[in-house]
């Protein structure tokens, strides 16, 4: 049986009741997203609450972090995880479909972060994919970005991690919603291998900053690259 929890340096994530366990993608985006000077941050599809907890560790006490999760069991476990953490007073989990949440809340955010679920129909037009999104809890990238854009403050940012092969398609959707690329990180599992994931940060106004970098996780099996260690050392116990 797999371990029902994953222990980090400053918090523990229980994930035995969640379909999506603690994984590398969540750790990557939680460590990489730029949260400097953010007062309010939203974690979309928060699952176990991992990204919300990582952001809480990285931010001062004035920063409020909210997570939204459609799966009631996962949302319950995320709330338990955040309640056990040192930052429980500035973490809140909402059990809701993201599109419903986006149309009902009056709150606006400095940064919206997500490790969205990947599914084959994620790039279908909204009318063709709506039922899939509603009934499986999966968002299309179009609906995710549309909802996120509506919740941003001026100068607000959106950061996602997703398969590298979808970069051009997702980027085209982002441009349609008036988003501008600020930072891009291509992620490969091992040095010399093509990227499998990409992390992109968009902003809702033109940006003078335009950064693009590459990150390899390993040099050999269980041999981490210095760049990966630098990114995640504040979280993993073994680093």
Image (tube, helix red, strand yellow):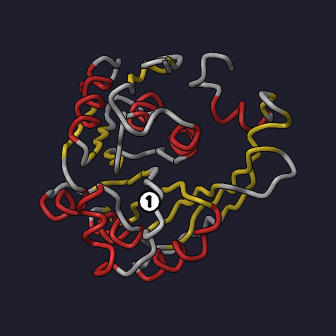
Q: Give the answer, above or below, for where 37 lies relative to 120.
A: above
- Coordinates of residue 88 in the picture (x, y in percent): 27, 24
Counting the numbered discs, the total is: 1
**Residue 214 at x, y percent in the picture:** 75, 54
Secondary structure at numbered mark 1: strand
- Against 91, is 122 above or below? below
Q: Residue furthest front?
A: 1
| Side of 126 relative to 7 (left or right) | left
- Residue 52: x %, y % from top left: 38, 37
Query: Observer-nearest residue: 28 or 197?
Result: 197
Quarter of the image with the C terminus in it: top right
Residue at image point 43% right, 54% down: 116
Along the line of sight, which residue is nearer the eye, 107 or 134? 134
Position of residue 140 relative to residue 136, above or below, is below
Going 48% across and 56% down the picture, which residue do you hit? 159
Which x, y percent locates residue 98?
25, 57
Locate residue 222 relative to residue 134 in the image: left or right: right
Quadrant in which residue 73 is drawn = top left
Q: Is residue 127 left or right of residue 239?
A: left
Question: Within 10 Å of the Cα at label 1, are there few (<14), some (14-19), or many (20+) other Cα atoms?
Answer: many
Question: Where does label 1 land, which residue?
Answer: 158
Residue at the spot 81% in from the left edge and 28% down from the top edge: 223
User: Compared with residue 1, is residue 120 higher up or lower down, i.e. above or below?
Assistant: below
Q: Residue at x 50, y 21 (%)?
A: 2
């Amino acid at each position: 049986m797999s371990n029902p929890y994953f222990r980090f340096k400053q918090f523990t994530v229980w994930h035995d009741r969640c379909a999506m366990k603690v994984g590398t993608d969540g750790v990557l985006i939680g460590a990489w997203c730029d949260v400097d000077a953010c007062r309010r941050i939203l974690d979309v599809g928060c699952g176990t609450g991992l990204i919300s907890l990582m952001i809480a560790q990285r931010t001062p006490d004035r920063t409020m972090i909210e997570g939204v999760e459609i799966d009631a069991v996962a949302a319950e476990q995320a709330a338990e995880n955040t309640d056990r953490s040192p930052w429980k007073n500035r973490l809140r989990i909402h059990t809701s479909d993201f599109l419903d949440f986006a149309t009902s809340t009056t709150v606006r955010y400095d940064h919206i972060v997500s490790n969205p679920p990947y599914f084959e129909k994620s790039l279908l037009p909204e009318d063709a994919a709506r039922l899939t999104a509603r009934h499986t809890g999966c968002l299309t990238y179009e609906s995710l970005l549309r909802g996120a854009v509506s919740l941003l403050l001026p100068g607000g940012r959106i950061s996602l991690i997703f398969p590298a092969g979808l970069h051009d398609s997702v980027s085209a959707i982002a441009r349609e919603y008036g988003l501008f690329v600020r930072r891009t990180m291509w992620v490969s599992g091992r040095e010399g291998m093509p990227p499998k994931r990409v992390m992109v940060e968009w902003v809702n106004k033109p940006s003078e900053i335009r950064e693009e970098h590459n990150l390899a996780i390993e040099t050999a099996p269980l041999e981490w690259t210095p760049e990966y260690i630098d990114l995640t050392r504040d979280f993993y116990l073994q680093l």
